[in-house]
Amino acid sequence: MAKSSKTNSSTPRNNASYKDSNEESQEASTLNPSKYAPTKDALMDLKQLGPEDGLLKLLEDSVKDIYWAENALLIALPKMAKAANASSLVDAILSHLEQTKTHVDRLKLVFDMLGKKPQAIKCDAMEGLMKEGESVIEDTDAETPARDLGIIMASQKVEHYEISSYTGIIKLAQKLGHTDVADMLTQTLEEETASEALLADIADTKISFSTEETA
């Protein structure tokens, strides 16, 4: 019986172009500031997997991506709070910092539900958003409406990214039958959505064009 040609349907591969798995892991670990170095399964090519396994890997990688992002926010949020002026904004950022700690803990539980150890894959999108937030602080004067509104805008971009990420992860988890994962992360999605709405309200009602907050 002839062998299936399924593996040849994609672009031909040059085995010489692929590094030893240990070298791949070392390279990925260098690019990943997390203490959790990517394992071999994290580096698998989706084209080598079946449809369901490919979706499962996409789910796992997406969780690793947002895990990196949430941990990075634990470092970035205190800096944003320190740079903000309006007390309502400072309080909102510090409140979200505490929420983010809970989000990280939930993701650890999600890893357990998936039968995986907590592992981060560097999130380039979140890194870029955090750099943008740092630029806002550098390019605006302290205790001015411009800085507070800039921090709010940068923070809303972060929230929008997280909302999109969690929405996608939840839908993917549901598709794969991981309702426990979907239910767990729905709590986080609701909190991220509420945080974005609070930032919008602060921008509309609490930041004036003077250096004082409105009533």
Image (cartoon, rainbow, N blue to C red):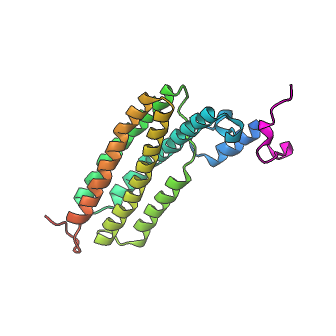
Residue 170: say if magenta: no
Q: Position of residue 148 (x, y in %)?
A: 31, 65
Residue 18: say if magenta: yes
The image shows residue 97, relative to residue 186, as above or below, that is below
Q: Residue at x 47, y 58 (%)?
A: 129
Q: Position of residue 157 (x, y in %)?
A: 41, 59
Can residue 163 be seen at all in this image of the molecule? yes
Q: Position of residue 16 (x, y in %)?
A: 86, 44
> Which stretch appears magenta?
1-20
**In which quadrant is the C terminus drawn?**
bottom left
Can residue 20 be seen at all in this image of the molecule? no
Picture quadrant where residue 102 is located = top left
Taking the view exactly as shown, the residue that stands out farthest to the left is 215
Q: Position of residue 64 (x, y in %)?
A: 54, 40
Main SS of the magenta segment? loop
Report whether 79 appears left or right of 66: left
Report whether 116 appears left or right of 97: right
